Image (cartoon, grey):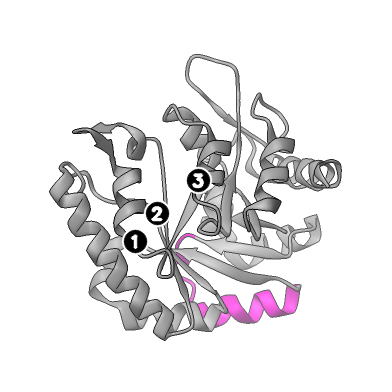
Amino acid sequence: MIALQLYTVREQTGQDFIGTLRQLADMGYHALEFAGYGGTPVAELRSAMDEFGLHAISAHVPFPQLENSPQQTIEDLHTLGCRHAVVPGIPEERRSTVEQVRALADTFNRLGETCRGEGLQFGYHNHAHEFAPLDSTTMFKLIAENTDPALVNLELDLFWAQVGGMDPIVLMREYAGRMPLLHCKDMLDDAEHSDAPVGAGILPYEQYLRVGSKIGAEWYIVEQDHPRNAMEDVWTSLRNLEKLGQSAQ
């Protein structure tokens, strides 16, 4: 199933959050992943989603917020109807050494336990730096090996894994069962590794979807960090994922 990470349309939600939700529903989206609430009370967002036929599957939650104010964060997620709480990144000063990352993994296990007790699933979203060498290993491998698969999911960003020098298909197969959420954006064949709507670049999305269906992926979440025209780009990604999903069956 297809969802949208709302960070992609942050300029639009910053101007009119409720109106943007209506446009996304009209476009054909039914599921969302939040990345902040734009100052709008979460109860108002939930009411609007109910009205427009949308539902929230997950939210990106800043690590300090979940670490220091878990109950308020969890209450907001319950109000929205989310099933997943995802940390989208870690400050560099807390991931620079193997010891720091192992300590981080311990914290993830504790947060995962807290979330499970509240009927939520905890997860971590990667960028490219998780795959950079760290002593004789990587941050991604340390997190994966030092967290309990029952408590900590890995929200694989397919684009950033590729930028980090990894094969996303290999990662999906290696961590099958831990990746219910996959982030989907494409890559242009340029020196900057520019992101693009799904189907408008060089990444093998039909293969990604085929493997995703085998390893337990539940949601393919459209996201672009640098959309050229956000509303046009998310429309393109949605239509192409729908077509690719049919081809991959």
Q: Position of residue 55 (x, y in %)?
A: 66, 72
Q: Is residue 233 left or right of residue 96?
A: right
Residue at (36% x, 35% y) in the render: 131
Of circles 2 and 3, the one toward us is 3
Label 2 packing within 10 angstroms: few (<14), some (14-19), many (20+): some
Secondary structure, mark 2, is loop
Find out whether residue 49 is within the magenta segment: yes
* Stretch in magenta: 35-52
Residue at (56% x, 62% y) in the render: 33
The answer to whether the residue labelled 2 contacts the one labelled 1, judged by CB atoms less than 8 Å apart, is yes
176 is higher (above) or lower (below) than 18: above
Q: How many marks?
A: 3
User: Which mark is on residue 88?
Assistant: 2
N-terminal-most mark, 2 or 3: 2
The CA distance from mark 2 to mark 1 is 7 Å
User: Which mark is on residue 62?
Assistant: 1
N-terminal-most mark, 1 or 3: 1
Label 3 packing within 10 angstroms: few (<14), some (14-19), many (20+): few
The residue identified by callout 3 is 174
